[in-house]
């Protein structure tokens, strides 16, 4: 994995924490603002809907990236396994040839 991929978990955690903090800060600001109860409830509902929508979008994007990275990792694993298996087989064949040469000598 590249350094960028390793930082994905930390960045996503920071981003989600930022969104949660922003939502809570906005909610607190609304609570102390001089508005009627109905206006306040409507404003809180709008902000909550926006925050939930953004979090869902970000989670969906993160899931897509994680799935793509996982699939890429599986492909790399298959490639490396194939290379190693081929190398082992070639080594066995070379060893068998050398054993036959030793028997003939």
Image (tube, helix red, strand yellow):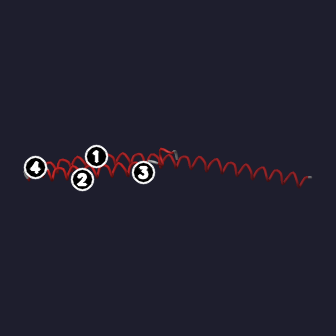
Q: Which residue is mark 2?
A: 24
Earlier sequence position, callout 3 versus callout 1: 3
Q: Which residue is mark 1?
A: 54
Earlier sequence position, callout 1 versus callout 2: 2
> At x 80% / y 53%, what residue is drawn?
96
Name the one closer to the observer, 99 or 66: 66
Earlier sequence position, callout 3 versus callout 4: 3
Judging from the image, what secondary structure is the residue with disc 2 in?
helix
Cα separation between marks 3 and 1: 18 Å
* Nearer to us: label 1 or label 2: 2
- Residue 10: mark: 3
Judging from the image, what secondary structure is the residue with disc 3 in?
helix
Rate crowding at label 3 as few (under 14), some (14 to 19) or many (20 or more) other CA atoms within 10 Å: few
**Dots 1, 2 in contact, CB < 8 A:** no
Q: Which residue is mark 4?
A: 34
Rate crowding at label 4 as few (under 14), some (14 to 19) or many (20 or more) other CA atoms within 10 Å: few
């Amino acid at each position: 994995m590249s350094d960028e991929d390793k930082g994905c978990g930390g960045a996503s955690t920071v981003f989600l924490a930022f969104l949660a903090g922003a939502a809570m800060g906005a909610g607190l600001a609304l609570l102390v603002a001089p508005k009627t109860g109905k206006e306040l409830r409507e404003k809180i509902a709008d902000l909550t809907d926006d925050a939930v929508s953004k979090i869902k979008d970000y989670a969906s994007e993160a899931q897509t990236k994680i799935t793509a990275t996982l699939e890429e990792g599986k492909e790399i694993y298959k490639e490396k396994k194939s290379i190693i298996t081929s190398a082992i087989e070639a080594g066995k064949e070379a060893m068998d040839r050398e054993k036959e040469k030793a028997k003939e000598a």
